[in-house]
Image: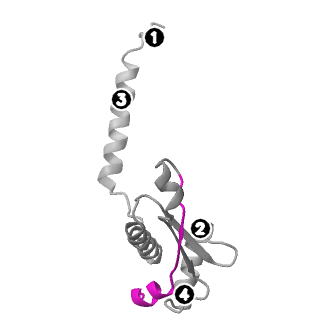
Amino acid sequence: MFNEDIVLKELVFKAIRSSGSGGQHVNKVSSKIELTFNLKESFAFTEDQKARLLNKLGHRLTKDGVLILQCGESRSQHKNKELAIKRFLDLIRLNLEIQKKRIPTKIPKAVIKKRLKDKRVRSDKKLNRKKPNTD
């Protein structure tokens, strides 16, 4: 499919300050990780795979074809880096997966007959609820 080692070497990480509560710790420690990956200049994917990823991830990419992921869930920079890498690889695998084309199946004749018979039974049941016509 694709070579993970090459992809991991092309990733660029940047540590930034995390937002949210945490008191003084959050103000002095850069534990949030920003992962950037330049898809257009990557050597890990074939041209078909790049086109597929550009199409599928278009809304998540910058104008230059750079994917940016941030992870600041943990207070540990290493844990955030691991989470960001895991999310990135899952995202790439998911969007490279080619869905099988759905083949529409024909409705069996017995099912059509049963549906029409049930409709007739319901119709007759409702007709029997009406007052009889005395003319």
Residue drawn at the location 66% of the way across and 72% of the way down: 62
Q: Which mark is residue 60?
A: 2
Disc 2 or 3, which lies upstream in sequence? 2
Q: Which residue is mark 1?
A: 133
Circle number at residue 48: 4
71 or 113, nearer to the observer: 71
Q: Position of residue 96 (x, y in %)?
A: 46, 78
Residue 18 in view here: no
Instruction: Say what amino acid the circle numbered 3 marks.
Output: Arg
Identify the residue at image location x=45%, y=90%. Answer: 6
Considering only order in the chain, which callout, 4 or 2, is on the residue closer to the N terminus? 4
Residue depth check, mark 4 versus mark 3: number of the one nearer the observer: 4
Q: Residues within 10 Å of mark 4 (few under 14, many from 20)?
A: few
Q: Amino acid at mark 4?
A: Asp
Q: Nearer the viewer, residue 34 or 108?
A: 34
Cα gap from disc 4 to disc 3, whole angstroms: 55 Å
**Stretch in magenta:** 1-19
